[in-house]
Image (tube, rainbow, N blue to C red):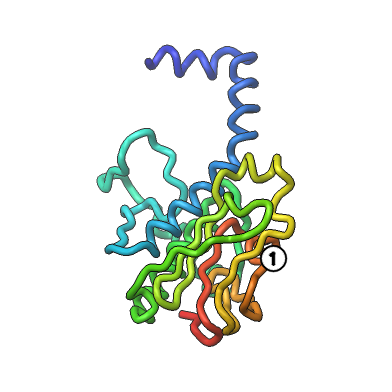
């Protein structure tokens, strides 16, 4: 196994192929990572976060809490987020930290929003590419199958009905009028959103 891994880096042709494939898959992987994390943090049950996995976790085994954690880097990124930064979805993993921080803060400060579970269905040409549910006031929205979504032409006129009250995405701070929301707008910055009625920011 060690020799096989070494060969990837020692052979320039193989290395180039692996780098190209990895680069083409990275955006979809990041999208899936954000979706999986928001679903895990907002679904029924008690959410957990392995120490050190607030950013991307790329090991091929379960996270190991004995590994050293760069707390200074996480504090730096969190300070930027708390100052209003909306981090890019990139190799830093700061976008995942945004999702983790805001979802856990909302559960802590407004537990009454997480007392039920109602699945929500989108309508439109890309309806199969979204998972959404209402926990009793907190609405989770997450894109799925991002590669196929891109190949099909993205969201187009796909909408999600969230009720008549205006809502705000606690991840981006952007407000929406309620009703049938266009997913092309709600998921324009991130492939995930966590919506609450206006005034519900953690």
44 versus 178 height, above or below: above
Residue lying at the far bottom in this picture: please name it: 199
Q: Position of residue 106 (x, y in %)?
A: 42, 75
Which quadrant would residue 101 be assigned to in this image? bottom left
Q: Residue at left 63%, top 61%?
A: 187
Which of the two residues, 163 or 5, is positioned nearer the viewer here? 163
Residue sitting nearer the eye, 145 or 3: 145
Nearest the viewer among 128 and 167 is 128
Q: Position of residue 123 (x, y in %)?
A: 62, 60
Q: Residues within 10 Å of mark 1 (few under 14, many from 20)?
A: few
Is the residue 128 above or below the residue 186 in the image? above
Query: In this view of the protein, can residue 189 be seen by the observer?
Result: no
Q: Is residue 20 visible?
A: yes
Please name the residue that numbered disc 1 is placed on: 185
**In the picture provided, is 132 more to the left or to the right than 59?**
right
Residue at the (54%, 14%) spot, across then down:
10
Residue 179 lies, with reference to residue 15, above or below; the image says below
| Residue in the picture at 35% in, 81% down | 112
Looking at the rendered structure, the number of numbered marks drawn on it comes to 1
Q: Position of residue 64 (x, y in %)?
A: 28, 43
In the figure, is residue 116 to the left or right of 169?
left
The residue at 65%/27% (across/down) is 20
Residue 150 appears left or right of 4: right
Secondary element at image label 1: helix
Q: Position of residue 85 (x, y in %)?
A: 60, 68
Q: Quadrant of the N terminus?
A: top left
């Amino acid at each position: 196994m060690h020799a096989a891994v070494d060969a990837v880096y020692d052979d320039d042709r193989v290395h180039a192929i692996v780098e190209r494939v990895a680069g083409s898959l990275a955006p979809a992987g990041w999208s899936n990572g954000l979706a999986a994390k928001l679903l895990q943090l907002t679904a029924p049950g008690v959410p957990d976060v392995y120490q050190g996995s607030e950013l991307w976790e790329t090991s091929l085994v379960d996270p190991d809490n004995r590994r050293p954690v760069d707390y200074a880097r996480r504090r730096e990124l969190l300070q930027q987020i708390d100052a209003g930064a909306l981090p890019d979805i990139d190799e830093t993993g700061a976008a995942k930290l945004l999702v983790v921080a805001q979802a856990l803060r909302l559960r802590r400060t407004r537990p009454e929003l997480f007392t039920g579970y109602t699945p929500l269905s989108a309508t439109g040409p890309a309806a199969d590419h979204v998972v959404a549910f209402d926990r009793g006031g907190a609405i989770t929205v997450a894109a799925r199958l991002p590669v196929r979504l891109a190949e099909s032409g993205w969201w187009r006129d796909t909408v999600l009905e969230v009720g008549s009250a205006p809502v705000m995405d606690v991840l981006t701070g952007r407000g929406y009028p309620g009703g049938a929301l266009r997913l092309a707008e709600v998921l324009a910055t991130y492939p995930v959103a966590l919506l609450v009625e206006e005034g519900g920011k953690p």
